[in-house]
Image: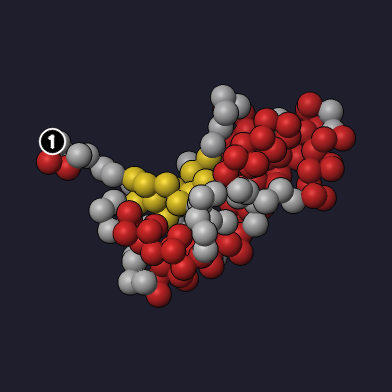
Amino acid sequence: VRSVGDFTVGVAAFPELHPRSENTTEDRRRLAGKLTRADFGITQFFFDPVPYFRMLDDLAALGCTVPVLPGLMPVTNPASIARFAAMNGSRLPPGLWARLEAASPADRLQLAVEAASELGQALLDGGAPGIHLYTLNRSEAALQIAENVGFGGAGRTPLR
């Protein structure tokens, strides 16, 4: 793609491993190979920061220093996101899921924003170069999360 224009190239990353990966070693080797040809990576959504930071450590051990943005998806629709998670191998946090499924739509939006904001802040505090928000056409959630983690103001600025 670089031979036909001045493009920025991003690739997908899976902190909890690609669903078709047989093991972590092979998964990380393939990801590092993709990242050597890219400007950045964006992860599939996840709910626990530990696999993300473990993935970065694995990539660093392979000599890969390309930035990988964590992808966050506020759980505004638990049923849909559970289906997405089943397809891509993302683990669902049972306690959060129970609260989200029991909540009214308005309360669910607030819970989703709070959970994604807490995860985003933990990732940024841990050194993530930015965050990618999967919005699923729910801009109000994304806007609130961005504000909660300090984007758009005098605080952090997103990776460019």
Q: Quadrant of the N terminus?
A: top left
Q: Indicate left or right for 157 with 38 as reference.
A: right
- Viewer-proximal residue among 54 and 24: 24
**Amino acid type shown at disc 1:** Val
Residue named by callout 1: 4
Residue 24: x percent and y percent? 51, 65
SS category of the residue bearing label 1: helix
Residue 99: x percent and y percent? 84, 42
Q: Indicate left or right for 82 with 24 as reference.
A: right
Category of crowding for the residue at label 1, using alpha-carbon neighbours closer than 10 angstroms: few (below 14), some (14–19), many (at least 20): few
Residue under the point 53% across and 67% down: 54
| Residue 108 seen | yes
**Image quadrant of residue 31?**
bottom left
| Residue 159 seen | no
Residue under the point 50% across and 55% down: 21
Residue 135: x percent and y percent? 56, 32
- Viewer-proximal residue among 23 and 98: 23
Q: Is residue 120 above or below residue 61?
A: above
Residue 144: x percent and y percent? 62, 37
**Image quadrant of residue 108?**
top right
- Colour theme: secondary structure
For this orientation, the residue located farthest to the bottom is: 61
